[in-house]
Image (cartoon, rainbow, N blue to C red):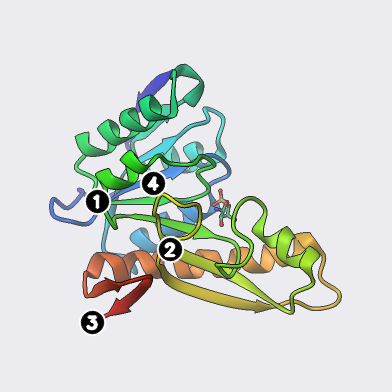
Amino acid sequence: MVANETGHSGQKTPPSGGRRLGVLISGRGSNLQAIIDAVTDGRLDAAIVVVISNRAGAGGVDRARAAGIETVVLEHGAFGSREDYDAALVAELRRREVSLVCLAGFMRLLSPSFVQAFPNRVLNIHPSLLPAFPGLHGQDQAWRHGVKVAGASVHIVTPELDAGPIVSQATVAVEDSDTSDSLAAKILVEEHRIYPEAIGVVLAGRWRIDGRRFLRI
Ligand code: GRF
């Protein structure tokens, strides 16, 4: 199913240049909310021109609508293959001239053709200190492993899962009293802080990639 909805409140007119964000979500959308708040507060000079969810019931869709952001629900079950689904995603993003794609709890692998459509222009937030604990439930993996320091990473998306150049990281101390859930909550606070900041850094454009390294210039 493909559904479009345009909200009516809030956001300022989207800029035309390279500051048009497309945010991809699957769930509650707290990182999306952090980005919305940063744009609204003027901490992030950008506009979210579309939020795309692969799940109709995602809480983040409601957050986007409440902020007056256009939403698209693109359910993957309606497509025959990953390539077809990703081509539809690319078309929705290109139609809105999105300059930077931000994955915010988007629970799907993206094909190489999607990544190639936005070279070095897809970011992801991951709840671990990469390259440790890629994949699902990074916080729980870290807690079970018994690490003393955990954290969050923002990275550029490449075809390999959670493996692209790291833009930004933040650490949290793991206390003996922490549970998997309390650790995840501490990490989430840092996610909300570093993701909008990292988006601003990438949009500002004074960086280059050297091998695996993201370097400010
Ligand atoms: C976050 O922990 C993020 O790091 C991971 O998925 C979760 C999404 O949470 N990729 P939310 O939907 O942003 O609240």
| Residue type (three-letter) at the residue carrying disc 2 | His
Q: Residue at x 33, y 36 (%)?
A: 70
Assess disc 4: are there few (<14), some (14-19) or many (≥20) residues with their C-alpha within 10 Å of its C-alpha.
many
**Quarter occupied by the C terminus:** bottom left
Disc number lying in front (1 or 2): 2
**Vertical order, 11 against 215 (above or below):** above
Give the alpha-carbon distance from disc 2 to disc 3, as whole Å: 17 Å
Coordinates of residue 11 in the picture (x, y in percent): 30, 48
Earlier in the chain: of badge 4 and badge 3, it is 4
Q: Do the residues under discs 1 and 3 have CB atoms within 8 angstroms?
A: no
* Mark drawn on residue 184: none
- In the image shown, does 34 or 173 lie closer to the viewer? 173
- In the image shown, does 107 or 72 lie closer to the viewer? 107
Earlier in the chain: of badge 4 and badge 1, it is 1
Give the alpha-carbon distance from disc 4 to disc 3, as whole Å: 26 Å
| Residue type (three-letter) at the residue carrying disc 1 | Lys
Task: Tell whether 170 sits left or right of 37.
Answer: right
Coordinates of residue 211 in the picture (x, y in percent): 33, 71
Assess disc 2: are there few (<14), some (14-19) or many (≥20) residues with their C-alpha within 10 Å of its C-alpha.
many
Q: CB of residue at label 1: within 8 Å of ligand 1?
A: no
Which image quadrant for residue 110?
top left
User: Mark 4 = which residue?
Assistant: 23
SS at mark 4 in the image? strand
Disc number lying in front (4 or 1): 4
User: Mark 1 = which residue?
Assistant: 12
**Quarter occupied by the N terminus:** top left
Assess disc 3: are there few (<14), some (14-19) or many (≥20) residues with their C-alpha within 10 Å of its C-alpha.
few
Earlier in the chain: of badge 2 and badge 4, it is 4
